[in-house]
Amino acid sequence: MIMNYEKLVKLLNDLAQEFLVMESSELDIPTAGKFLNQLEEILAQARALKVDPIKGCVSTLSSILERIIMDTIQDKAAAISMLEDGIYLMQSIADSHKKTGTYDGSIQEFMDKVISLVGPVQNAVTEAASPQEDARARTDAQDPATRDEEKIEIQDEALTRDFITEGLEYIEEIEINILNLENDPENKDYINAIFRPFHSIKGVASFLNLEKIRSLSHDLESLLDRARNGEISVTSSLIDVVLDGADALKTMIRQLRDVLEGKASTTTDLDIPALIARVKKIEEGFDVDAGAKKIGEILVDDGVISEEKLNQVLSEKEAGMSSKKLGEALIGEKIVKPKQVSQALRKQVDRVADMATIRVDTVKLDDLIDMVGELVITQSMISQGMKNQQNVDKRLTRDISQFFRITSALQRISTSLRMIPIRQTFQRMSRLVRDLAKNAGKQVSVELVGEDTEVDRNMIDEIYNPLVHMIRNSVDHGLEMPEERIKAGKPERGLITLKAYHRGGNIVIEIADDGRGLDRRKILDKAFRVGLAHSDEGLSDQEIYKMIFMPGLSTAGKVTDVSGRGVGMDVVKRAVEKLRGKIEIESAVGEGTRFITRFPLTLAIIDGMIVKSGPEHYILPTISILQALRPPRGAYNSVVGKGETINAMGRLMPLIRLYDMFGLEPEFKDPWEAIVVVVDSERGARCLMVDKIIGKAEVVVKSLGEGLKNIKGLAGGAILGDGRVGLIVDTEGLFELAEQR
């Protein structure tokens, strides 16, 4: 039971977290619908645990969300405040039940506040009924004999008639495409063509309070979404259950039509819970047909029918005398009752073995990855030690080589455990674009590419904020108004593309728009006015574009609630640098702008070049390195009072001596005797002088501790193969420090 309480608490915490990060403007119809689905999960858990106050709260909050969807609440801000209070109240109730098994408080005060805002809440009293009443209600819901007596109530006759007509057309569309999918299981277009009608049926059914239709449509939609995302395969079992679900929906919609015509008022001959149980099993990855007994065999085993009678019905089916499924045929001939077939179906599903999965605490997972990192360090030490040994035993060498292979495989596997698709982050961006476009009076489409690209779980939240800022700038500044786009010969609807892919041990995320592009002249003029630049001599387009990342520089014509204050892109740059990433800009006037961000795949391991300066070893992130060279004497220039430069890659670059920055005694003081590493930065390329290059390595990043974590120019430390501690250089911080001297 403790586990169940933990699940309830987790559901509530997840809801609270999503609600807290949501801005009030984001509570639109899709978001309200998402919260309604989450409340359904909470309600199911509360029912199982008999936590009656939470059931009452769920009904109350659902009523608020339904009124938001129907736009019948005048004071939306007060409604959002009520939702927040209700979520906190449910958390308190769940915590109390988990500790004591009861809740001493009352939800009446909260419900009175809600009633004063939205009026009477119909189902709240029912949901807060006594445990005895609730148990009886659950029994009735599970018993087909009771379930068949359920009344169908018409909320809006005109809308219901439209729903019946459209719903039956949707079912026909589903039946056509599910058969196409069966012939071509890998075709995602067919899955989408089936998914959309279920989604439409669910939406209208929810509005009309047709709970059975909404629930079944929702579960089938979720199943197809998992198939669409490649999480489960399109099997014959999936095809069968979708077809059976479509048949059930068709029956319920026809029964709804009968009610309108005065022919009937109840739903009959449907076992929706059994059908949903099949859907859930397939959604979890089970093939309910594999290894399971057939319905006829279960009915014979249970003594419901004789084997002779079963064979007779099967013979009729094989002879083409009946096209019905076995269960339908047996019910039609009144050999068995619907309830008996339903029970057999449940037994069939339940006999499928549960999948062996476990949940692991993220803290334990992080500890595992840290220990693997220590193992990699030990491997490097052993490797370094072997290089220094002569006449090493061949058997020992072979065994150590095997150990290295196992360690490398373990590192790859452990790192992959923490990788998750970027899909959810991209989908949040898609919704953000729609909201921003609506507020700005623009028409914008979103194209998502590479949603399955995996990113370290610890980086997902860190990536989110800079992406939000870039999206806001693309919608607000980048894309033109519809009439402006038409005049420019562009489609009325703008396009924003989000793209993610892996390249060279990094994850690359691109945000592109087909808007007006960056105006080089406009950026320079603004930079001159605010004193961020004094001349454009020798500046490339890339260097000018990067000026938008400087604090206080904005080219916006006016300040809006979205952007224009000159702080957003500065925040982006700092956030990207914090993640050891880089950002580039490509733009063309009248064609659009592309922001290209590169991040390491994980924050735990860094791909770096090990260099030596004086007695110390340092690690330079390879993502920042453009070139390494020993410059000729003639490439060195010194200007008194101005600094030193190196002519590298066809242009003059400032020279920074690493030993000078950290107060070391170097091996070489002349650049033509030392090594110069050309490092890219937001301030432009710089030349970093070191004594020698030791080599390239993947190192595990270690914190320098509380006392040393804020040293400018250093991002952390790592244990090298020879046991030394190497300091990881923060190039941006180092160059900033150099400019201050």
Image: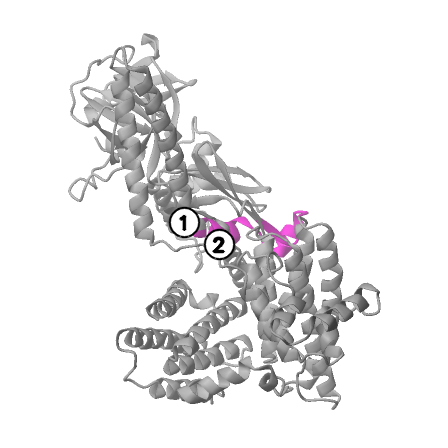
Amino acid type, mark 1: Ile
- Tell me residue 632's x, y (percent): 34, 9
Q: Which mark is residue 460?
A: 1
Residue found at x 25% / y 25%: 381
704 displayed left or right of 268: left
Secondary structure under tag 2 reads helix
In the depicted structure, whether residue 358 falls above or below residue 105 = above
Colouring scheme, one of rainbow, by chain, secondary structure, one colour: one colour
Q: Which residue is mark 2?
A: 424
The question of residue 489 being in magenta is answered with yes
Q: Which residues are magenta?
A: 468-496
Q: Quadrant of residue 53?
A: bottom left
As drawn, the residue found furthest toward the top would be: 633
Q: Quadrant of residue 359?
A: bottom left
Residue found at x 51% / y 59%: 353
Q: Report whether residue 729 is seen.
A: yes
Residue found at x 60% / y 60%: 292
Q: Quadrant of the C terminus?
A: top left
- Tell me residue 509's x, y (percent): 48, 42
Secondary structure under tag 1 reads helix
Q: Are marks 2 and 1 in contact (CB under 8 Å)?
A: yes
102 displayed left or right of 129: left
- Packing grade of label 1 (10 A; few <14, some 14-19, many >=20) is some
In the depicted structure, whether residue 34 falls above or below residue 659 = below
- Tell me residue 528's x, y (percent): 39, 39
